[in-house]
Amino acid sequence: LAPGNLYEVTLNDGRKYKATLTGSDQSTDVAVLKIDKSDCPYLTLANSDSVQVGQWVIAIGNPYQLNSTVTSGIVSAKGRTIDLLKGEYPLEYFIQTDAIFNEGNSGGALLNDDGELIGINTAIFTRSGKFEGYSFAIPSNIVRKMVRDIISYGKVQRAVLGVGIQDISDRLSKRIGEEVGSGVYINRVNPQSPAAEAGLQQGDIIVSINGTAVNTYPALQEQVALYQPGDMVNIRYKRNGKVHNAEIELMPLNTEPHKTVVRNDAPLQGIGLEVRYDEGHPESGIIVQNVIPAGSAARAGIKPGFLISEINGVKVTGIDQFIQQLS
């Protein structure tokens, strides 16, 4: 999508209108188009946090140019990530359903049995290129925030805590003595960030934001994404087995140009990794750029986007130091 392109919106009764692009967000695959017409019928946005696995849903789309095709199914899972979206901070927290999607369903509505919008259909997981039982929709709570920002500011206002985070894996669980899925592990706190000022430290485990439990990396991302830079949020976290609370003012995502270095030196190739380092970026660190499928890194579960903070307990702050420690 680009502001200079021409767009056309067709209503259900066949009337067509020229549309202009108000704005779009690559990290969530959401765009807002505007037509010159008032009193249009519209859908009510439901609270997608209240969606339950197993509940019935209805999907509407235009697959293969078949106008307003309706399929039904159930919610198979929530909070799915499928490495679909692009951008510096892709936000994936999809609702998974078995309602049939095919080419042309993207952008269509996913409804609950009250006719309320709980998501926007966006993707399928397939090896054949056709529907295989796995469909994904962007939750309405994310859509609501993205659309509100685009209409008000022309772009999404992204906020961050100022920390690096990761899921608690089996290996990490054994090292820190916390159960898998019990929260989100802080592997780095950015200096002079609101999180640092609030006293958060590397090794703390975030368990909730404003009373909403966050047990996984995508769940925390989704909760933070619902707020604006400057909003105050209550962070509940664990440190050495004790629960603490902190009030943190979310900081804006730095979008200033920064130097990016990508490396695949021989020691990295030996374990099947390509990494990058973003100078001056608020989430600076050794970031996994690419993983060779047959390499030992892939077998260990490392994926593109992972942030590497230490090797055998030694903190790494640059690629040269990372390679030295790896060697």
Image (cartoon, helix red, strand yellow):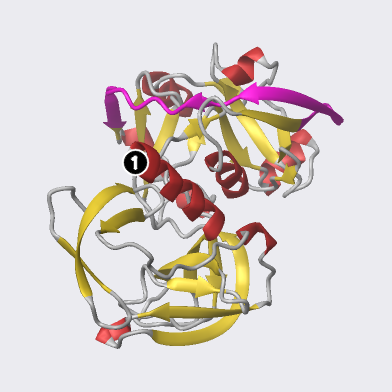
Within 10 angstroms of label 1, few (less than 14), some, or many (20 or more) residues? Answer: some
Q: Residue 156: x and y, percent? A: 40, 40
Instruction: Tell me where the magenta segment starts and ends, as one range.
Output: 237-262
Q: Is residue 209 visible?
A: yes
Q: Is residue 13 magenta?
A: no
Q: Residue 102: x and y, percent? A: 36, 80
Instruction: Report the quarter where the C terminus lies.
Output: top left
Q: Residue at x 36, y 35 (%)?
A: 275
Instruction: Report the quarter where the N terminus lies.
Output: bottom left
Q: Nearer the viewer, residue 173 or 305?
A: 305
Q: Is residue 93 above or below residue 165?
A: below
> What's the magenta bit mostly, secondary-structure-wise?
strand
> Is label 1 in a helix, a strand or a loop?
helix
Residue topped by disc 1: 269
User: Residue 172 occupies which quadrant of the picture?
Assistant: top right
Amino acid type, mark 1: Gln
User: Residue 320 occupies which quadrant of the picture?
Assistant: top left
Q: Residue at x 43, y 24 (%)?
A: 284
